[in-house]
Image: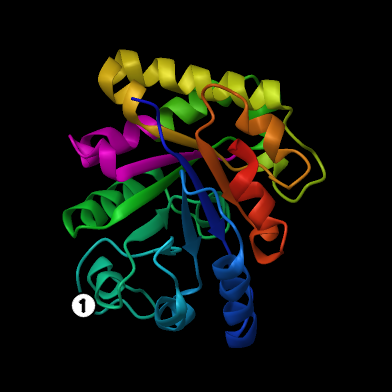
Amino acid sequence: MPRKFVVGGNWKMNGDQKQAREIIENLTNATLDPNVEVILGVPAIYLPLAKSVLPAKLELAAQNCWKVAKGAFTGEISPAMIKDIGATWVILGHSERRTIFGEKDDLIAEKIGHALDSGLKVIACIGETLEEREGGKAEEVVYRQTKAFVSAIGDRWSNVVLAYEPVWAIGTGKTATPQQAQEMHACLRNWLSGNVSPSVAELVRIQYGGSVTASNAKELAGSPDIDGFLVGGASLKPEFVDIVNASS
C-alpha cells in the first residue's frame, strides 16, 4: 500500500490571532490535493482559535508537550490538554528543542511515549548539525536519535511520522539537494528495516524538513523515500498551498 503524503506546517513562535485566521482561511479556500494529509503546528496559545475555524480537511498539532499528564511544570502543556482542545498531533524532538532548549534523546523518547499513550499522533524529528555532517557523522547521529524512540513507540508506528530535518539546511542559506535528502531518507528506511522490522520500514512516513519552498518542493516530492514535508517559514505564506500540492 502506498504511503500517504503528509505535509506539516510548523508556525514556530510566529503570528497573532489575525494572521492565524488569515492563514487558515487561505487554506480553507484553496484547492488542496485530497490525497495529502495536512497538519498545522500552531503556537499553543492559538490552538483553541485554530481548532474553532479549522476545516475538516486540515489537522491540528501542538509544537511540543511534556512527558506527564499534569503537575507542577510551569509553562508546559500536556498531551491531555492538547487532546482536550481538539488537536490530534504533536511535534516532538524538533532541532530547535534540541539545540536551543537542550532536550536530549532520552527525554524526547519519554515525551513521545507519553504522547502516544495519551492518544496523540506524533511527528518525531531527527537530524544532524553542519558540524556532524562535515565530520562524517550524519547517519550515525540520525540512527542514534531514531534508536532512542524505538522502545517508546513500540508497535504504534502507524501513529508516528518521522521528520528528517538537516539542521544545517534550516535558515542558514545552505540547502540539501534532492539527492542528499533522498539518500538520507533511504538510509533511514534501511536502518528501520534492519533494526525495527521490514514492515515498519515500509509503513512509516518520513518527511523532509530542510527549508522546503514552493520552488524545490516538486523535485523533492518526486523522491521515492520522501513522504512529505515539515515546513517552517513557508507555512506562513500563500506558497504553502503549492507545497501541499507538490506531489500531485
Element type where label 1 sits in the image: loop
Q: Quadrant of the N terminus?
A: top left
Residue at x 58% of width, y 25% of height: 138
Residue at x 51% of width, y 60% of height: 101
- Give the crowd class for mark 1: few <14, some 14-19, many >=20 residues within 10 Å: few
Specify the segment rendered in magenta.
146-166
Q: Is residue 13 above or below residue 183?
A: below
Foreground of the two, 128 or 239: 239
In the image, taking residue 148 as reference, residue 143 lies left or right, namely: right
Residue 83, image quadrant: bottom left
Residue 61 visible at all: yes
In the image, taking residue 1 as reference, residue 37 lies left or right, namely: right
Residue at x 27% of width, y 66% of height: 79
Total numbered badges shown on the rendered structure: 1
Q: Position of residue 133 (x, y in %)?
A: 66, 27
Q: Position of residue 146 (x, y in %)?
A: 39, 32
Q: Position of residue 94 (x, y in %)?
A: 50, 51
Amino acid type at circle 1 is Gly
Q: Is residue 162 above or below residue 48?
A: above
**Residue at the right extreme?**
173
Foreground of the two, 159 or 54: 54
Q: Is residue 24 above or below residue 40?
A: below
Q: Is residue 161 magenta-colored?
A: yes
In the image, taking residue 68 as reference, residue 191 lies left or right, namely: right
Q: Position of residue 221 (x, y in %)?
A: 61, 33
Q: Which residue was labeled with disc 1?
A: 71
Residue at x 59% of width, y 43% of height: 209
Residue 137 visible at all: no
Residue 85, image quadrant: bottom left
Q: Is residue 115 magenta-colored?
A: no
Q: Quadrant of the C terminus?
A: top right
